[in-house]
Image (tube, rainbow, N blue to C red):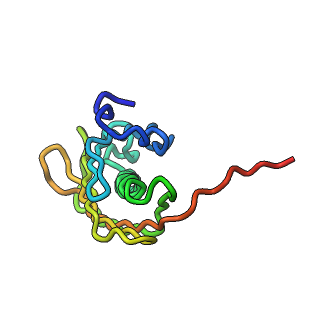
Amino acid sequence: MTDRDTDLPDWYVEVRSELDRRMGLEVLELTPQRVVGRMPVSGNTQPYGLWHGGASCVLAESLASIGAVAAVRPDRVAVGVDINATHHRSVTSGWVTGTATALRLGKSVLSYDVSLVDDTGARICTARVTCQAVSPRRPNISN
């Protein structure tokens, strides 16, 4: 965890993914209605030095999924089932900050609008993410 993660709920450590760690995700704010986080551009670029569009999708889906988990826990988990992202402009350095705002927090379907901006506040991507609340899978134990 980073210093920025210290004010987050205790359960967040359990849902933080290896992909989020590898990409440098820092969650700054976390409620079911709104999740704010950021990722460094460095290490998340395409071969031309531009922020990778896939990194935008990872950031958007991670923030929305974390918010959805906050809304349905502790009995259920949330998984992403749909993402639509429009890339508006490129970025080559600094951080990309995302804000996932709940559109609907239903019992089984949760939807978020996600805005990603660069360090100047210019929007680089707009995404919509839909998550589904499901029962957690039991560990697969084989003989």
Q: Name the residue nearer the viewer: 108 or 27.
A: 108
- Residue drawn at x 46%, y 63% as measured from the top left: 80
- Which residue appears farthest toward the right when viewing the image? 143
- Residue drawn at x 25%, y 61% as measured from the top left: 101
Q: Name the residue nearer the viewer: 76 or 120.
A: 76
Q: Name the residue nearer the viewer: 125 or 17.
A: 17
**On screen, 4 above or below 121?**
above
- Which residue appears farthest toward the front when viewing the image? 75
- In-image side of 63 versus 18 (left or right): left
Q: Position of residue 83 (x, y in %)?
A: 40, 67
Q: Position of residue 142 (x, y in %)?
A: 82, 49
Q: Position of residue 90 (x, y in %)?
A: 25, 53
**On screen, 60 above or below 111?**
above
Residue 3 occupies quadrant: top left
Q: Position of residue 137 (x, y in %)?
A: 63, 57
- In-image side of 21 versus 92 (left or right): right
- Residue drawn at x 53%, y 64% as measured from the top left: 134
- Residue drawn at x 73%, y 51% as measured from the top left: 140
- Which residue appears farthest toward the top when viewing the image? 3
